């Protein structure tokens, strides 16, 4: 199973990706987590990315593509993956299509988690209080939501035009949302409640 999960910051992509990873035994590739690991390790890339991330902006496309390509080249990616946080703009969506074609690993599905704006803001406030992620402070969340609307929302249209987009309501109990995602994935209806 090769899957892209789309949705605004705080829409539950990370939480649901972790559940799907367990369900299918495939990789969960969160580009935000990959970047935070670089920041934590104090690498040159991490140092460059930190200020951009803290401001709520997008890190350069070539950095992201390089990171993703390296991760997908590792043997454990052969069984499949869930991409969480990539693609974030149309350049990345094109780059992903070319990369997957080149490595012969086409996507099985693209799922967008839909959550209303006020719920998103509330969830980011809760995450900020719990995890102290610098970019979850209210000002930066506002910036991230603007970038999402300007640059990432068109990515959903990119997949919709190709007939690949499934939209799932991301509000509700975690199990409910997971079941809704499973219900739109190809060939998994038997897995529901299983
Ligand atoms: P996330 O954990 O997905 O919310 O990502 C946290 C931050 O990492 C984002 O606000 C961006 O600064 C950066 N980031 C993550 N994924 C990407 C991406 N695909 N393109 C550019 N920047 C990204």
Image (tube, helix red, strand yellow):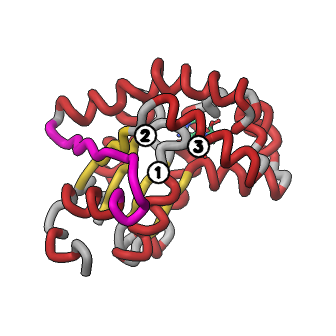
Q: Earlier in the sequence, mark 1 or mark 3?
A: 1
Label 1 and label 3: CA atoms lie apart by 12 Å
Residue 38 visible somewhere in the drawing: no
Q: Magenta residues, as a range?
A: 163-177
Q: Few, some or many C-alpha atoms within 10 Å of disc 3 (few <14, some 14-19, many ≥20)?
A: some
Q: Residue furthest right?
A: 42
Q: Quadrant of the N terminus?
A: bottom left
Residue name at image x 71 percent, y 29 percent = 138
Residue identifier under label 1 = 13
- Left-right relation of 157 to 134: left
Residue 83 image position (x, y, % from top left):
43, 53
Q: Earlier along the polypeptide chain: callout 3 or callout 2? A: 2
Q: Is residue 156 above or below residue 47?
A: above
Going 67% across and 46% down the picture, which residue do you hit? 126
From the top left corner, tell me how far across and down residue 48 is, in percent: 78, 37
User: Within 10 angstroms of label 2, few (less than 14), some, or many (20 or more) residues?
Assistant: many
Image quadrant assignment for residue 64: top right
What's the CA distance linking mark 3 and mark 2? 13 Å
Label of residue 123 in the image: 3
Q: Of the numbered discs in the image, which one, if any, rests on residue 153?
A: none
């Amino acid at each position: 199973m090769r899957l892209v999960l789309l949705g605004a910051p705080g829409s539950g992509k990370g939480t649901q990706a972790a559940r799907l990873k367990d369900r299918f035994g495939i990789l969960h590739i969160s580009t935000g987590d990959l970047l935070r690991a670089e920041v934590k390790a104090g690498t040159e890339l991490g140092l460059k990315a930190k200020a951009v991330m803290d401001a709520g902006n997008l890190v350069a496309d070539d950095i992201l593509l390089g990171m993703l390509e390296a991760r997908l080249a590792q043997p454990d990616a052969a069984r499949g993956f869930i991409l969480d946080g990539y693609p974030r703009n149309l350049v990345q969506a094109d780059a992903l299509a070319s990369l997957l074609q080149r490595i012969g690993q086409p996507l099985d599905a693209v799922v967008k988690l839909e959550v209303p704006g006020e719920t998103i803001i509330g969830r980011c406030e809760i995450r900020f209080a719990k995890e102290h992620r610098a970019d979850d402070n209210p000002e930066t969340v506002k910036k991230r939501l603007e970038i999402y609307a300007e640059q990432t929302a068109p990515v959903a249209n990119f997949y919709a035009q190709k007939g690949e987009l499934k939209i799932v309501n991301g509000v509700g109990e975690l199990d409910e949302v997971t079941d809704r995602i499973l219900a739109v994935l190809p060939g998994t209806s038997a897995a529901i409640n299983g």
